[in-house]
Amino acid sequence: MDSNERREELKKILKTTFSGEPLTITRLAKILNVSTRTVHYDLDSLESELKNQGLKICKQSRKGIWLESLNGNGSATDENEYYVLSPKERRDRIIVALLEDKKHSIDELAEMTEISRNTLLTDLKNVRETLEKRGLSYGSKRGLGIWANGGEQEIRDMLIHIFAKSVYDFRQFLKTSAQEVSPQQKSFYDYAAGLPVTGVAKFFLEIMESHKILDNDESANRMICALVVQLKRLQQGHRIFQSKQVEFLSDEGEHMKNFSAEIADGLFKYHEHFAKPEEIRYIMRELLHSRIFLFPVNVEKNLPKNVNLKAIELARKFIEYAQVWLGDIYLDDDELIYNLAIHLQPAIERANFGIMLNNPLLGQIREQYESLYVFTRKAAEQISDSMGIHFSEDEIGYLTIHLGAAAERKKMRLTKKLSVLLVCGNGVGTANLLAMTLKRHLHYINITKILSTYKLIDKDLENIDLIISTVPLDIKDVAVLRVSPIMTGEETKVIENQIQYFYNKKFTSNGFGSESLKKNPTLADLMKAEVIELNFSANTWEEAVRKAGELLLSVGAITENYVEKMIDCVKRMGAYIVVCPGVAMPHARYEDGVKAVAVSFLRLDKSVVFVNEDDPHSVDMLFAFSTTDEKSHLRMLQDLWKIFNDNDALNYLRVAKSKEAVLKFIRDYN
């Protein structure tokens, strides 16, 4: 190419740095197939031309070269004025173009995305990968151009996936000018040009309101995009002639079918094929994909009246599987069971239907609830394997949120607090003011009573951890902290430190050793020779569980009551503690007598049998554990989970000749 063509190409390449990374001289030379010296000359030649266009070439050693925007005064201006599409945005626009009923040349696509031919060729590799990943084919032929095709369902899915990434104000859709449309939304606005988008959106939002469907902007946004795509494809003569029948757990299927037919009737005026059975099933499928599920509702509370028994049963099963890892019993959390049942119903239908759900919060969920996500996936696998379906990572992310909310609820209910008696001889008003001051600064105390000195009797001291008093008291059996009736900021800080000492003494001192005080101890931290027993002889599962619990008891991690509660849990709920072939993890609630985070390892000389719904499970190894809260044991469980998924590791533990060999293996393995 001549120098003018090359510089035009260079300008296009430089504009990609607005939303991409800076480019080095060497990289530019390679793209243009010229020397680095030539690139330097071209950049110098372009500098004044770009400046006239409000652009500045920026250079930095070891970073590269990039463009920035300038206003008329030479200062930075709004980047959107010179917005350059990111690689992902270019990919999406190219895919939308390729799914039109025509073929495109390289030059057309390069001009549309405002990039060079070389950059476009790189983009097309990503385009092809994306299309094939979603069941579509990519075609190209010299002299004909480039195109994409596939099944009608797959084409619609691809378009909706691209368009629904942005949120639109559908009420103002027709009033929005081309200049007001953001670059991210432009692709959909171009696609929907000439369509009655506002009318479709208005109708759908009204029908959602009439059925009292709970508001969800993200779901409504996606569903309106789906209906617009459906209308456009029908106008172009593309119909869905085969669609999988949706199977529902109960009569919700009839509600959803009727709701979908009602939507189709309302859109019939835009195209008669909306009323076709296959297109109605398509609407039903997209409602599920958009996480819009129709329940009979209680208008007064705006909540579902009930959930079918099958979904409740599945929710309970899910919680049973999950609590093996979470170390607590959540089956008494009615809110969790109810919310899970509501979510599992459409989730199972989506899985049956092969719907690829997008969870925009997945990354944050994995980061914020890393351990909980892993254990939720484990529980979900038990449900999905039994039903012959597959839950996607995105779906598991939503299930994780429900368990996370349950953990937070339980934490709020069971927050450990010191029982405090407040003694104040300065009148009711002063006593109440002092109580409010203490509660505001010391959230971990529970003031059970407020008394004057003359009304204090021995019975008031029962189950009291600490007395806070404004007057001197001669009491031997309970600690007394003396405070001023009206506390200063400095005095509050002193009292905070003193009360923190009593709190730590009660709730974190347990005689279990310094390792138990670590915030998130590993399996190697917790596994000691004292909590390992090899080749123990047990005739029943109950004897095995009791022995595994006694190992924890021997080091002061639990009370005797905890051992009995572990056995009660199995009797009441079955062999849910069998986590993989041959291995069980007995445990109970942390309020049943836990003093420290701990784990024990018991290997039997012969297997014992756990029975769950007439399904026997032979077990020869037990890992009993205890935890003081919802999080302290999760790191240890992650380490165990790796071992449970490694047959070689399990086999080694079955033949290890000594406790020392077990300890060394665990240290080295994790």
Image (tube, rainbow, N blue to C red):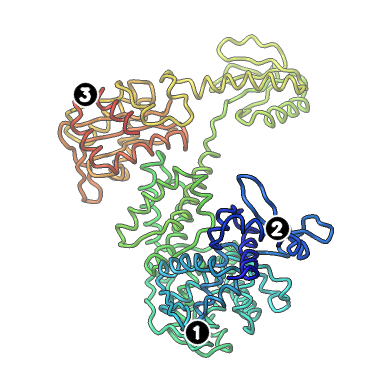
Quick check: 605 above or below 470? below
Read off the residue under disc 3: 658
In front: mark 1 or mark 2? Answer: 2
* Mark 2 → mark 3, Cα distance in angstroms: 75 Å
Which amino acid type corresponds to the residue marked 2 in the rendered image? Asp
Name the residue that disc number 2 marks: 44
Taking the image as shown, residue 184 lies to the left or right of residue 546, namely: right
Residue 207 figure quarter? bottom right
Quick one: label 1, few (<14), some, or many (20+) residues within 10 Å? few
Label annotation for residue 101: 1
Q: Quadrant of residue 556?
A: top left
| Callout 1 amino acid | Asp
Mark nearer the N terminus (1 vs 3): 1
Pick the quarter of the image with the N terminus: bottom right
Q: CA distance from mark 1 to mark 3?
A: 71 Å
- Distance between the Cα atoms at labels 1 and 2? 44 Å
In front here: 414 or 394?
394
Residue at 32% in and 21% down: 554
- Percent across and percent down for residue 630 are 47, 38
Vertical arrangement, residue 511 with respect to residue 331, above or below: above
SS for dot 3? loop
Question: What residue type is disc 3 on?
Answer: Ser
Q: Give 38 or 540, whichever is nearer the viewer.
A: 38
